[in-house]
Image (cartoon, helix red, strand yellow):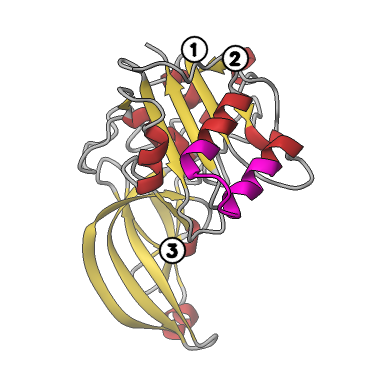
Amino acid sequence: MQLKKILKVAMLAGLISVGSTYFFSNHAEASIKNEFPRIKKNSDLNGNSLKLINPKKSNVRYKRYKIINRSNIKTKLFFQQGGNFFSKNLGIKYQIKNGSSYDGNAFYADAKEKLYNKKTKQYNTYYHLSTLNGNKMGWTWDKNLVAYQSSKTKLNKTIRSIFPGAKVNSDLQYLVNMGETNVYSLSSLASDNPYYEYMDEIAGNRTYVLRTYFNSKISSNYDQKYYHKLISNKISYKNYVKTLIHHNLKHLDLNKKSYKNYQIGVLSYPKSSPRYGYFSLLLKEP
């Protein structure tokens, strides 16, 4: 792993403010199935097989939940961050193959169910997941999942408009999404983090990397200033993003008329989200 290049990652708000150079890749946005040709589709990021083992029954848990409804859904992509896999009525809990980890891995969801917890008197939603090559895994709580975000959301399109001609690269789009999980994050630069080995593998050495993260204790005054301008409606979203990119990625030319042959992955949050103003950008040079 080219760790020296990785340590050049530029981070807004100085979670690890270690420069503004570039490094790193190449997945293809499409209609979900076969969307990510380069991903290890039936294993974790360390290459260990993802397979459920050691089913353990629990009559107590089975009787505690009442199924309200269950239905098939249009296939969605999620990243798993913690939690467990269960049978559809939660009566059976599974482990995965020894040495494997589903944390931070991507799964397809093809069904969901709503359950009522008789003890807590609360409703919970569970999704049925499969690995990217179709190996069925089981049901898991929605709170342990992070939904994949397309590059086609309104604010993602706004960010992409700053780089006319740049083409969305599905590997990069996958990586900015994976970076939002609490397992493999752009803010974690541990040398043994398998996310970075994968990042280095597919991003190559000509990719600009920027992830915003605002915290009053670690953000620069400059970043905080423009963040508050944004949430106070004193600056447009596009100008806000351009300002922070220019400030944090000084080697990136924002005056080019065309970014033809550049490849891009972007992630942002809508105004209704408490994370509005946070964004991630991966921009690979030709």
Q: Secondary structure at mark 3?
A: helix
Q: Secondary structure at mark 2?
A: helix
Depth order, front residue of 231/116: 231
* Image-quadrant location for residue 4: top right
The amino acid type, in three-letter code, at marker 3 is Asp
Q: Is residue 56 left or right of residue 8?
A: left
Q: Give the residue at mark 2.
A: 5
The amino acid type, in three-letter code, at marker 1 is Asn
* Image-quadrant location for residue 150: top left
Residue in the picture at 54% in, 85% down: 120
Q: Which mark is residue 205?
A: 1
Q: Does 162 lie within the magenta span?
A: no
Image coordinates for residue 272, horizontal then vertical, percent: 48, 61
Residue in the picture at 66% in, 45% down: 214
Q: Which residues are magenta?
A: 225-240
Dominant secondary structure, magenta: helix
**Mark 2: few/some/many CA within 10 Å (<14, 14-19, 20+):** some
Do the residues bearing badges 2 and 1 touch, measured as CB atoms within 8 Å? yes
* Image-quadrant location for residue 210: top right
Residue extending furthest front?
A: 234
